[in-house]
Structures are given as C-alpha cells and as structure tokens.
Amino acid sequence: MVATDLDGTLLRDDGTVSVRTREALAAVTAAGAAHIVVTGRSVPWTRHVLEDLGYEGIAVCGQGAQVYHAGEHRLLTSLTLDRQLAGLALAKIEGETGPLALAASRDGLDGEVLVSPDYRLQGGPLRATVVEDPAELWTAPLNKVYIQHPELDDDALTQVARATAGSLVDVVMAGEGIVEILPLGLTKATGLSLAARRLGVKASDTIAFGDMPNDIPMFGWARHGVAMANAHPELKAVADEITESNGDDGIAVVLEKLLLG
C-alpha cells in the first residue's frame, strides 16, 4: 500500500498533481498496490482533490478522524472531538498564550469550517464561514479545532499547547499556520490502520509519504516512511528516506525506483 499525505506531499504548491506523479501512482496500482490518501483535511476540503484524481477508493481525512469511501461518497467511520474537553483545553492554553484566533471543522460529509474574523486561512481558496460570535463554533459536533496566535510561531504554539493541555487533547502542527486540537489519541495512524484493515493490507506492506509533524505517527505505523525534501525537520528526523520536494515529483521518484525493482 502507498499512503500519501496531500498538502506539501502529493500536491504541488499550486494545489495540482503532476502528470509524472499521476502516472507513477497509476503504475503501482496497476501492479497490485493500493493507493490511499491520508490527510489532515476534513472530507469537504478533500473531496474536490479526490475527484480531480479520479480517486474512488478509501481516504483517511481529518487527521484520522474520518475514513471516507470516495467511490460511494460516504463516511465509513467518524470520530468527533469532545467539545467540553476542547473548551477546557482551549481555556488552559489561552491562560498561557492570551487570546487565540480560532476555527472549527464540523463533522460530516458537508461539515462547514467556521472561522473567527482574525483567523488566517491557509492553502488557497478553501471554503469557510466567518462567524462573529465565538460561541457559534461549538454548536455542532466537531472533528477538530484550529488555533493561531498573533505572535507565536507554529512550533512554539504547538509546544505551549501540548504542555498545558496535552492531558486533555492532542495538539498537532499540520502545516504553515495550521495548529490543531484533536481528540486525545487520534493520529493519522489511527485512521490508516482502520482503512488498511478494510483493504486487507498490513503495516509491513506499506510505504508512507509526508511532510509535516502530523505525519510522524503514520511513519511509525508504516514499514517505510519517506519525507519530502521540503518536510519539517521533525519528520525528516524519523524518516527512513528523504526524497525530492513536492514540486519536484518526490513521490514519483521513489515509486519509479520501486517499480524497477
């Protein structure tokens, strides 16, 4: 099985997948391997990418919270965040950092992403709804909450959040400007293991590609973890291999070598 993260990994910086990478993935699936997308994005922010790829298999979304069958357009599993615990965690974090900009990803196939007016959206024209009243963020089941600080960088914010609220929730840095509060114990490896079980594939038969610290558990689960050249230093430190960047067909470089034997 070939497990690929999306942003910074399978997707180039313009949000597209190169012809070379598409052909390499098509070749490995024709040879009998399964390709599975494993992304921090929730289903509504992932579906258009899967449709562009012609992807009809299982995808792991929402940092492992959602296992989605693209061909059948349905959620196979979905784990939500305990909103009371998340609110307590957020209060503890803000006790250390001061006020944070917030966003919340609602559960479901069409779950909205709600953002406070000061939250800076990353990754281009992703659909989100601005809400003036922070209480609106908590009125429906959520799979994650995003936090941003006006001065602390992503690594520093992640470190503070883990130190103050790590017994209540998990905190991951998933990309530039993207620090997330998740259900305790949830990782990409959680969703990937569920998806692999459905596909009849083992961790020992899996190669995983990623670029951010939220991919570390996935690398720990898979037999072989490949970090992109543009990856965060924390991921490179635990990778079995480092390939070219997402803009230089890093996934294709590795897969083509595997196909050649």
Image (cartoon, helix red, strand yellow):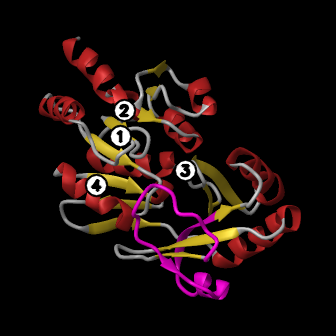
Residue drawn at point x = 53 percent, y = 32 percent: 231
Q: Disc 4 vs disc 1: Cβ atoms closer than 8 Å? A: no
Q: Viewer-proximal residue, 124 or 155?
A: 124
Sequence-wise, the earlier of marks 3 and 4 is 4
Residue denoted by label 3: 187
Sequence-wise, the earlier of marks 3 and 2 is 3
**Amino acid type, residue under disc 4 in the picture:** Val
Sequence-wise, the earlier of marks 2 and 4 is 4
Disc 4 secondary structure class: helix
**Amino acid type, residue under disc 3 in the picture:** Thr
Residue denoted by label 2: 247
Sequence-wise, the earlier of marks 3 and 1 is 1
Q: CA distance from mark 3 to mark 1?
A: 24 Å
Q: Magenta segment, which residues? A: 117-146
Residue denoted by label 4: 49
Q: Disc 2 vs disc 1: Cβ atoms closer than 8 Å? A: yes
